[in-house]
Amino acid sequence: MKVDSLFFESFPSSETDQIKGEAEVTINKLGSKMDCVVRFNGSAVLPCDRCLGDVQITLTFDEFLVVQLGESTSTEEEIWTLGPECHELDLSQPIFEWMHLHLPSRRLHASVDQCDPAMTAYLDKNRTISAEPQRSSEDEGTDENNEIDPRWNALKHLK
Ligand SMILES: [Zn+2]
């Protein structure tokens, strides 16, 4: 099963459609149950946390799904049940969910050198501006300390 941008057309809610790869599905039949083993090998393109530029991330995982035959079709439970009317097993929904589950939470270029320097500088500047109110209250704190110090010195002189 191929995963490309076409695959994502059926999932408009996706965080990214920039995942490409191959999902290899192996089905092991055990009596009335089937073990569907999905091995995914591919990559995802996501915005870098530091510079928002595109980063290509390797995405590989192994997952499995247990499917059993039953009276009616149900794919809500952890174990899927396929009714007699079901002749095809569509794994695109679980594969879609697994791909997102396995996306790393931190997406960064391998080194800062690979980041877009203009963008990093711009973002850093904005971070500094938004952090300034906190910083100024810290400054007030140090000012108070500075005020206390002369008083202590004055007390020392009184002794
Ligand atoms: Zn970057």
Image: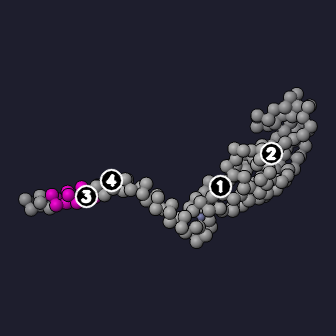
Label pair 4/1, CB-CB below 8 angstroms: no
Q: Residue at x 19, y 60 (%)?
A: 149
Residue 143 - label: 3
Task: Choose between 22 and 61: the one closer to the eye.
Answer: 22
Residue holding disc 1: 104
Bounds of the magenta segment:
142-152
For the residues labelled 3 and 4, the Cα–Cα distance comes to: 10 Å
Secondary structure under the numbered disc 4 in the rendered image: helix
84, above or below 130, in the image: above
Residue holding disc 2: 92
Task: Choose between 11 and 151: the one closer to the eye.
Answer: 11
Residue 137 - label: 4
Q: Residue 82: which quarter of the image?
A: top right
Mark toward the start of the polypeptide (1 vs 2): 2
Farthest residue, direction left: 158
Mark toward the start of the polypeptide (3 vs 2): 2
Q: Nearer the viewer, mark 4 or mark 1?
A: 4
Neighbours of disc 2 within 10 Å: few (<14), some (14-19), many (20+): some
Q: Residue at x 84, y 39 (%)?
A: 67
Mark toward the start of the polypeptide (1 vs 3): 1
